[in-house]
């Protein structure tokens, strides 16, 4: 794991109408805002707004991962069943390995919010050093899937998928990610936790301690 490298997150909003200026893009601002609230360690982002065009999506993902070195790429939009919803196909086309748990879990979480959650074909994959995750296009779906479901008193009822992302990035050799537990609590097995979170002087605990 690289201790000093800063987390680089690629953000890709995929929408014909937002890309054409028919409506203002809300996808990139929603992604930036949620990540700003959730991540307490250093990070920066590279953002792209593109149309629902398969070649553009593939080229954008390749550019973000291979040329810019993103550790994590979050896409929003184009996961449904309409003819121009091609984000999953483009994501799978650039994949080295599949991470099916993310898509399964996001659909499960999203069914707590909307019955049409089952219409999202969202996938997650690994390309080189990066985890690429598709989120649905509704701007509110970004928080719903990343943060999960809360009860009226604010307690977490269903964990969002971001809880698993810091450890996934660890396993891919990327930078250490600290989160704000009041937004999302990163889960790492005990053997992967640091003795003093965030100070960069990790001491791994023995397994089972
Ligand atoms: N980037 C975005 N900014 C603002 N709203 C969006 C964005 N993407 C999607 N939405 C909203 O969520 C709805 C569902 O998203 P979806 O990705 O299915 O869009 P769409 O109907 O294929 O159209 P488009 O690709 O032109 O956004 C849209 O109809 C729109 O109301
Ligand atoms: N959490 C969450 N998931 C969601 C939604 C939502 O509002 N919230 N919308 C659903 C709808 S209506 C559709 S059509 C699919 C695909 O959306 P997309 O084509 O915008 O990616 O995502 C689904 N998943």
Image (cartoon, grey):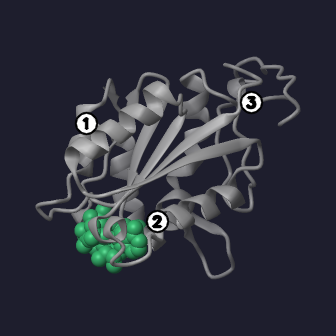
Q: CA distance from mark 2 to mark 3?
A: 32 Å
- Between residue 153 and residue 186, name the one nearer to us: 186
Instruction: Name the residue at the front extreme.
Output: 20
> Which element type, helix, strand or loop, lies under badge 1?
helix
> Which element type, helix, strand or loop, lies under badge 3?
loop
Identify the residue at horizontal 15%, vertical 62% (top origin).
81
Instruction: Name the residue at the left extreme.
Output: 83
Dot 1, crowdedness within 10 Å: few (<14), some or many (≥20)? some
Q: Are marks 1 and 3 in contact (CB under 8 Å)?
A: no
Which residue does the numbered mark 2 point to in the structure image?
Answer: 27
Q: Position of residue 171 (x, y in %)?
A: 56, 24
Q: CA distance from mark 1 to mark 3?
A: 31 Å
Which residue does the numbered mark 3 point to in the structure image?
Answer: 193
Q: Position of residue 62 (x, y in %)?
A: 37, 32
Q: CA distance from mark 1 to mark 2?
A: 21 Å
> Is the C terminus in the top left, top right, bottom left or bottom right quadrant?
top right
Which residue does the numbered mark 1 point to in the structure image?
Answer: 92
Q: Which mark is residue 199?
A: none
The mark lying in front, picked from 1 and 3, is: 1
Ligand 1 contact, mark 2 (Cβ < 8 Å): yes
- Between residue 48 and residue 200, name the one nearer to us: 48
**Residue 113 in view in this figure:** no
């Amino acid at each position: 794991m690289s201790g000093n490298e800063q987390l680089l997150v690629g953000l890709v909003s995929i929408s014909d109408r937002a890309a054409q200026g028919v409506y203002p893009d809300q996808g990139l601002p929603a992604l930036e805002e949620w990540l700003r609230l959730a991540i307490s360690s250093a990070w920066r982002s590279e953002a792209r707004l593109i149309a629902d065009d398969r070649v553009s999506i593939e080229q954008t993902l390749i550019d973000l991962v291979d040329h810019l070195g993103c550790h994590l790429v979050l896409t929003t939009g184009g996961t449904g069943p309409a003819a121009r919803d091609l984000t999953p196909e483009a994501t799978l086309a650039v994949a080295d390995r599949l991470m099916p748990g993310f898509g399964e879990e996001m659909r499960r979480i999203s069914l707590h919010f909307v019955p049409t959650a089952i219409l999202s074909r969202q996938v997650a994959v690994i390309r080189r050093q990066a985890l690429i995750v598709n989120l649905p296009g509704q701007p509110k779906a970004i928080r719903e899937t990343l943060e999960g479901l809360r009860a009226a008193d604010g307690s977490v009822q269903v964990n969002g998928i971001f809880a698993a992302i810091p450890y996934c990035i660890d396993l891919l050799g990327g930078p250490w990610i600290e989160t704000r537990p009041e937004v999302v609590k990163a889960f790492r097995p005990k053997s992967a936790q640091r003795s003093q979170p965030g100070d960069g002087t990790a001491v791994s605990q023995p397994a089972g301690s």
